[in-house]
Image (cartoon, rainbow, N blue to C red):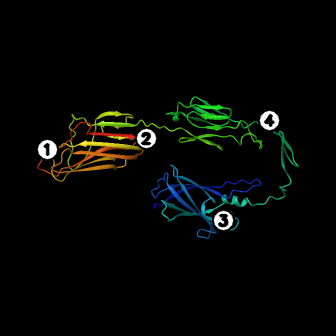
Amino acid sequence: MRILLLTTCLTLSLSILLAQVPQAIKYQAVARDSMGSIMENANITVRVSILDSAAGGGVVYSEIHKTGTNKFGLFNISIGRGIQPSGLFANIDWATGSKWMQLEIQQYEQGVFTLIGMSELLSVPYALYAGSAQVVGVDRDSQQLSLIGNSLSISNGNTVNLSNIGSDNQSLSLSGNIISISNGNSIDLTSFLDNTDDQTLNYSSGILSISRGNSVVIPDSVNDADANPTNELQYLSISNDTLFLTNGGFVKLPQETKTGLAFKAYANPSNSHPLTNYSWNQMIFEAEEFDDSAAYNNSTGMFTAPKSGVYFFEAKVQLNDIVGFCSNDAASICLRNVSTGIDLDCAVRNMDNTTTGAYLHVTSIAKLNQNDQVQVRVWKNYLCTTLPHPNNIIGTSAYNNFSGYLIR
């Protein structure tokens, strides 16, 4: 297991207004490996223990969090809301002695936790203790709020007229490629116009709908009993293919279904295409039959994935067999991901003096990242020295080609 280095940020949310203090401590950290590199999109398990009095003291509470990092290596947990707790977080006596936090990390579900470090909890977490402080000289049951019409009153106090406070009604609007919500923000949908620019938003009788999508019901009035014109404002946000509304629902934007990514290239039979014995030979199919996304380079023989996804590839090569073969002659053909240095799939052909038509054929289904490169390689292993083997390929484009397409 690699030891993780953590850059941490510890915060505590405290709300005291004659109410319960949240029994949790928010904890944020950046996970790094032993080389100091950020651990991107990694699954980790964190065990947090609260120790009494000093580092190495008795454990008064512990819990486990299964979480993951984002592309910046950042992860967030709420101490006090983990799983498999030992002890009660609410029963920690913050007023007695010092408290220490011990952090342990487990990666890849190996079952072994590695101690990362311990640190003393200073003033911030003791806001939890403040939640239990008594309010002196206040009779909590002696006052009551009441709302009559637009008048808000408190017993044994004053009255406030709410008639001049605005409403929380909001409306969506679309201008060009900009979608906006009143008293909120706006989002530019330009980057989502690929195969979605023929959609329109429509609002009718409290129902907001999108063509080729779903619809949501928007209330036409607000019963604003708290008389606060701002606490119900909502914001639009977008993540991948989903449009979100704070404190509301979400809408899935339609996905593109047709890939339109396919190519086929073949070897020009008028060119020699020499092959070196006992060596890998990169094949260049210089004539393109079609290339929908301009992803194949007929000068280098490289296919470059225009987007991440699952692809299908096929390659065929016919070796020159004019003079025949000897026993133990062999050849291989491979589809190789040049970006990772890994062969996707290979096929081997063994030949002898009875072999005719030395055809090599390989197919593969592979998951590629955007800009991964794939090429065709041929290994020629002619052991016989009694025959003057031609060192090239022969045949028409039907037997010497390279093709592929995006599945999804």
Looking at the picture, does residue 395 appear above or below residue 104?
above
Measured as percent of width and height from the top left, residue 190 is found at 53, 33
Name the amino acid, label 3: Leu
Residue count near mark 2 (Cα–Cα under 10 Å), binned few <14, some 14–19, many ≥20: few
Residue 225 is marked as none
Measured as percent of width and height from the top left, residue 36 is found at 47, 55
Measured as percent of width and height from the top left, residue 308 is found at 43, 43
Residue count near mark 4 (Cα–Cα under 10 Å), binned few <14, some 14–19, many ≥20: few
Closest to the camera, between mark 1 and mark 4, is 1
Name the amino acid, label 1: Val
Name the amino acid, label 4: Asn
Label 1–label 2 contact, CB within 8 A: no
Instruction: Name the residue beneath numbered marker 2.
Output: 307
Residue in the image at 33% along x and 45% along y: 363
Residue in the image at 56% along x and 31% along y: 177
SS category of the residue bearing label 2: loop
Q: Is residue 359 left or right of residue 2?
A: left
Instruction: Work out whether mark 1 precedes mark 4 in sequence or the reverse, and give the earlier one.
Output: 4
Residue count near mark 1 (Cα–Cα under 10 Å), binned few <14, some 14–19, many ≥20: few
Instruction: Work out whether mark 1 precedes mark 3 in sequence or the reverse, and give the earlier one.
Output: 3
Q: CA distance from mark 4 to mark 3?
A: 48 Å
Q: Quadrant of the N terminus?
A: bottom left
Instruction: Name the residue beneath numbered marker 4.
Output: 164
Judge whether residue 406 can be spotted in this image.
yes
Q: CA distance from mark 1 to mark 4?
A: 99 Å
Front residue (pair 66, 49)? 66
Quarter of the rendering containing residue 134:
bottom right
Residue count near mark 3 (Cα–Cα under 10 Å), binned few <14, some 14–19, many ≥20: few
Instruction: Name the residue beneath numbered marker 3.
Output: 88
Looking at the picture, does residue 212 appear above or below residue 337?
above
Quarter of the rendering containing residue 182:
top right
Name the amino acid, label 2: Lys
